[in-house]
Image: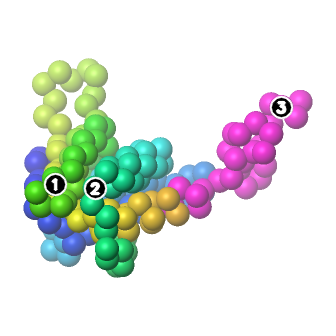
Amino acid sequence: MYRDYESADAFTAGVIGLPGARTFFLQIGDTSDLLSIKCEKEQIAALASFIRKTLDDAPAVSDRTAAKPKFIEPSDAVFALGTVGLAYDRRDNQLVLQFEEITPDDEPEFDAGRVRVRISPTQAIAFCEHAEQLVRAGRPPCVYCGLLVNRDGHLCPKMN
């Protein structure tokens, strides 16, 4: 499967489930062609961080008021996220992102799915702000050991 979006109405992240048992997704497309990619919390955080770093080298964004696309709970993901590519197109002032399916080690002939999308800097900023909120909304880290604390507490190795 290969999809190429020259522009996308939707470029957002979302979660299903409670902290400690959440499933993260990227959603890309428009109302008639919306797809979801399953990913890890760390991948969402890293993507937001890399997008921000890329925007630091881009021309300043004058209009920072992009509407946050609504996350629609997916029935299924098109694939699980593996490799991510990120570039900045100076000519069109757009970010170009490519998402590739994780490739199983035991299948050398595996035809990995790929999705490429172009987004505006305003969309990128809205994604980063929303993604950072999602990541922060998870389980808090223990103040002593840094491990995540479940709702019912946790066994801190530094407190033994």
Q: Secondary structure at mark 3?
A: helix
Categorize mark 1 by other alpha carbons within 10 Å: few (<14), some (14-19), many (20+).
few
Is 15 colored magenta in this rendering? no
Write down the residue under mark 2: 58
Q: Which segment is the magenta one?
A: 134-160
Rounded to the nearest whole Å, what is the CA distance between mark 3 and mark 1?
49 Å
Disc on res. 90: 1
Q: Is residue 33 visible?
A: yes
Identity, as a three-letter code, of the amino acid under mark 1: Arg
Residue 113 picture quarter = top left
Q: Secondary structure at mark 1?
A: loop
Disc on res. 158: 3
118 up-or-down from 30: above or below: above
Identity, as a three-letter code, of the amino acid under mark 3: Lys
The residue depicted at 15 percent of the width and 74 percent of the height is 32
Say whether disc 2 or disc 3 marks the residue closer to the N-terminus.
Answer: 2
The residue depicted at 43 percent of the width and 49 percent of the height is 49
